[in-house]
Image (cartoon, rainbow, N blue to C red):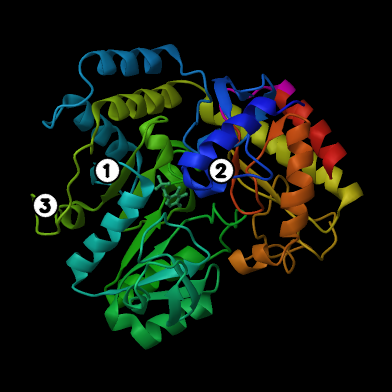
């Protein structure tokens, strides 16, 4: 593959964009390919190379790159009627009605412009509603580029994970490992009366894809109820991806107080949202006292793209198709691993997938079919990742430096490190899956 154009573009970009990119994860080694355009389940780069795209914008593109006719028409009409107004529009109400109808924990919703903005606002809302300051997050959970959740450390011993964040932010943030029910009970025992909320992804989607063990979310729900704290599900990745239109909370049967959205709900345009019980969401201004506002919030083009995308998914076999292909891919990769790297773990559910380069454990006859589900009677149960730390202990260097470039050179675009989830879309085909499996066979 020739990458001359991309290299030249990166050269120019380095002079005017820090690190040559606008989001850090895009700065792949030695330089990223620059995308010319999308085509169905593929992207084509500046040098004309074609890749099967399993990055899908890091999650927003449920339908792939070719927007179906109704989505395209709605976006173009909205854009041609003047992009935004600073006054409400019907399409905001329609998308809110759609989301509240389908997502069990959501009675009201406030739309914002990014997942980060959604989690920032959700934390402020939980603090305002409860009158408490502390939040509990998962070690290695990801909730965007926000001060309160960019922390490292254990329990109450946390520090900001980035320069530029005062220590005092981390004073209010406690951490526990994902899937550690005892740690959850302990943190509530010590700090329960001060905890405004537990903030977690239903499935860790930015740290290798880690599925919850049985009872973990139930334990969090019970602890929050016992101590008067709120449970916030960050469904920015899982929303309208896992469990279809009911989202991961519907699939797992958990009723969070607040849910944050982003990615898919904007149909490929910048978006975030905070949904939940009316009593809580109505604390946002102007109904309540917790300040929340945004020039672009509820942007008509975004609202139209999100609404038509979700309507399309409701009326067509989007989830069956994408989930079915992803299941084939996960099962196919598991078969390849049995031969080549039986210690590695296939993870993912619905249309999410990843291979974790775990260091020990054999691939038993009794593994979870189609991706790790944390089945206690699985022969790999003690070896498959239970939290972000287990993913960090995997062969992350091999993944990033050898495996990812080998897949890229075969025309398969994966997320460029061991941590970020990959996605199958409605636009992928059987042939894409076959081609990808051949590439895995070569690269593993
Ligand atoms: C992507 C993501 C965010 C941040 O969303 P942005 O739109 O990138 O700000 C927050 N939480 C989770 C779980 C995410 O996957």
> Magenta-highlighted stretch: main secondary structure?
loop
Residue 200 falls in which quadrant of the image?
A: bottom left
Sequence-first tag of 2 and 3: 2
Q: Are marks 2 and 1 in contact (CB under 8 Å)?
A: no
Sequence-first tag of 2 and 1: 2
Which region of the structure is painted magenta? 425-431
Q: Residue at x 34, y 46 (%)?
A: 104
Q: Is residue 429 magenta?
A: yes
Ligand 1: does it lie within 8 Å of the C-beta at label 2? no
Residue 109 appears left or right of 434: left
- Relative to 440, residue 288 above or below: below
- Relative to 431, residue 103 above or below: below
Q: Nearer the viewer, mark 2 or mark 3?
A: 2
| Cα distance between the residues tagged 2 and 3 | 36 Å
Label 2 SS: helix
Residue 335 coordinates in the image, percent (x, y): 84, 43
| Cα distance between the residues tagged 1 and 3 | 13 Å
Residue 245 appears left or right of 29: left
- Relative to 191, residue 349 above or below: above
Residue 278 appears left or right of 152: left
Ligand 1: does it lie within 8 Å of the C-beta at label 3? no
Label 3: how many residues lie within 10 Å, few (<14), some (14-19) or many (20+)? few
Kindly identify which residue carries mark 1.
112
Label 1 SS: strand
- Relative to 244, residue 313 above or below: above
Kindly identify which residue carries mark 2.
26
Q: Residue at x 59, y 27 (%)?
A: 321
Kindly identify which residue carries mark 3.
285
Q: Is residue 323 magenta?
A: no
């Amino acid at each position: 593959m020739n990458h001359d154009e991309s290299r030249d573009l990166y050269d120019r970009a380095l002079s005017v964009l820090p690190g040559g990119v606008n989001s850090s994860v895009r700065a792949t080694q030695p330089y990223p390919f620059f995308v010319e355009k999308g085509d169905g389940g593929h992207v084509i780069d500046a040098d004309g190379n074609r890749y099967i795209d399993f990055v899908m914008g890091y999650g927003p593109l449920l339908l792939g790159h070719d927007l179906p006719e109704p989505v395209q028409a709605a976006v173009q009409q909205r854009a041609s009627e003047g992009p935004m107004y600073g006054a409400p529009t019907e399409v905001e109400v329609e998308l809110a009605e759609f989301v509240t109808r389908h997502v069990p924990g959501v009675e009201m919703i406030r739309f914002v412009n990014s997942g980060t903005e959604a989690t920032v606002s959700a934390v402020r809302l939980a603090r305002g509603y409860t009158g408490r300051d502390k939040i509990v997050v998962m070690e290695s959970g990801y909730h965007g580029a926000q001060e309160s959740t960019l922390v490292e450390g254990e329990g109450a011993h946390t520090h900001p994970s980035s320069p530029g964040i005062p220590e005092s932010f981390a004073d209010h943030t406690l951490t526990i490992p994902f899937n550690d029910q005892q740690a959850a009970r302990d943190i509530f025992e010590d700090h329960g009366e001060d905890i405004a909320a537990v903030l977690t992804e239903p499935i860790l989607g930015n740290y290798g894809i880690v599925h919850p063990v049985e009872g973990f979310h139930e334990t969090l729900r019970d602890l929050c109820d016992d101590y008067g704290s709120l449970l916030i599900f960050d469904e920015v990745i899982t929303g309208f991806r896992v469990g279809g239109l009911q989202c991961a909370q519907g699939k797992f049967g958990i009723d969070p107080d607040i849910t944050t959205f982003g990615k898919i709900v904007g149909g490929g345009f910048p978006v975030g949202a905070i949904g939940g019980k009316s009593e809580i969401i109505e604390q946002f201004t102007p109904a309540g006292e917790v300040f929340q506002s945004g020039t672009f919030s509820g942007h008509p083009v975004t609202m139209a793209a999100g609404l038509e995308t979700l309507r399309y998914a409701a009326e067509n076999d989007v989830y069956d198709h994408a989930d079915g292909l992803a299941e084939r891919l996960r099962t196919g990769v598991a078969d390849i691993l049995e031969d080549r790297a039986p210690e590695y773990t296939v993870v993912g559910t619905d249309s999410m997938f990843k291979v974790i380069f775990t260091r020990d454990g054999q691939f038993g006859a009794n593994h979870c079919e189609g991706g790790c589900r944390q089945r206690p009677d699985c022969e790999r149960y003690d070896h498959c990742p239970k939290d972000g730390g287990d993913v960090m202990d995997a062969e992350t260097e091999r993944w990033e430096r050898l495996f990812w470039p080998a897949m890229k050179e075969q025309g398969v675009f994966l997320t460029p490190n061991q941590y970020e989830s990959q996605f199958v879309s409605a636009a992928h085909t059987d042939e894409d899956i076959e081609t990808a499996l051949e590439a895995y066979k070569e690269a593993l």
